[in-house]
Image (cartoon, helix red, strand yellow):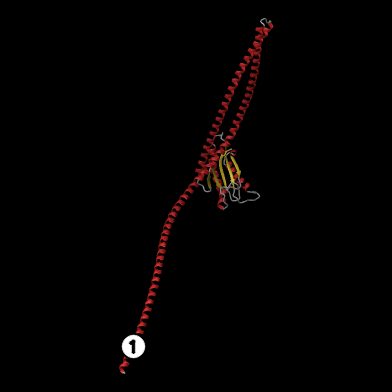
Amino acid sequence: MAGIGRSERSTNIWPGFVDALATLLLVIIFLLLIFVLAQFFLSQALSGRDSALDQLRGQVSELADLLALERRAQKNMKANLEQLSAELQASVMQRDDLRASLNAIRMQAEETETKLRRRLGESETARAEGRERIEAQLAELAGLSHDIEALKALRTELEKKISAMAVKAGENEKALLEERELSKSARAEVALLNQQTATLRQQLARIEAALQVSEKLNADQKAQIVNLGNRLNAALATKVQELSRYRSEFFGRLRELLGKQQGLRIVGDRFVFQSEVLFDQGSAEMGTAGERQLDALAVTLIDISQRIPKDIDWVLRVDGHTDTDPISTPRFPSNWELSSARAIAVVRHLIERGLPANRLVAAGFGQYQPLDKGHDEIAKRRNRRIELKLTQR
């Protein structure tokens, strides 16, 4: 009974053991399954990370390439910037050179215009005289041409008469051949006709000689007219050179005497006094400092004027200019009166110092000939001025 009981108890262990093993096996399988799944998902995650890492590496490479391109572009921009800076500096220098050249060209243009105006003024009188002489010569030539035409018409008429007489003489000779017995009166008529023919031929010869003399005289007069024009041009050129020489001496002496004084500028062929140096604001009464400067100027002008030949008709023009500020006083209703009064005051002072009155001209320009187009105080101060210019009347 006891043996059977032990056998039954021992037999009952194996199913539990088998169940335990089965459970353990299921657990192991479950763990393996979990491990496999974990390995699968891990491999998927790692492969995703590898692809993401590859993408990141590609992006990093692209960024490196872009950075290299940006660095190269930056270097190119720096080089271009340096080149542009150099070109800008060259352009600025070229602009300054062009401005200097433009100023020089303007100065030359003003001097050329002044010389041309002076030459035109100098040549007007000589041209008028030469024009009168040429017109007189042309009138004489016209009269000679009329006489020549009359002589030509007379010669044509004489030739016609000679031809008619020759025909008539031929007819008479034919009649003489046909009628050998001609009366004495007919023979006398033939002789008379022959004599008249000879006389007409002599007259024709004299007319031809007079015509040749007239043509020669016409040619001589044309040559005289050409010679007169050449002499007139030479005289004009000589006068222009003489006045230019004295004008150069005039400006050289004034530059040496007045060039360093304050308030005096040299603009082209003119000496410019600032109005503040000579006059108070809104006044035409000259101050002591201005009188001293004009006294020095008068000494130089008198010295030079005594050495200029009398046949050069020169004048010293004194031009008064104001700024754009209007003036309205009982004495000076406008800037015209103020500028004219200042120019007249300078002329009177020079006359009192001994300069000939017939060599001075006073002109007032008001505010209509400015040197500076600006409207600030500096521009106004530049435009308030007295200009002196040696020219020809």
Residue that numbered label 1 is attached to: 13
Label 1's element? helix
> 216 or 240: which is nearer to us?
216
Seen at 36% across and 81% down, the residue is 25
Q: If the image is split into quadrants, where does the C terminus sit?
A: top right
> 27 or 242: which is nearer to us?
27
Q: Amino acid at mark 1?
A: Ile
Seen at 60% across and 18% down, the residue is 208
> 287 or 251: which is nearer to us?
251
The spot of residue 301 in percent (x, y) is 54, 40
**275 left or right, relative to 57:** right
Residue 313 visible in the picture: no
Look at the picture and state if 125 lies above or below 71. above
The spot of residue 261 in percent (x, y) is 51, 47
Look at the picture and state if 62 lies above or below 129. below
Q: Residue furthest bottom?
A: 1
Q: If the image is split into quadrants, where does the N terminus sit?
A: bottom left
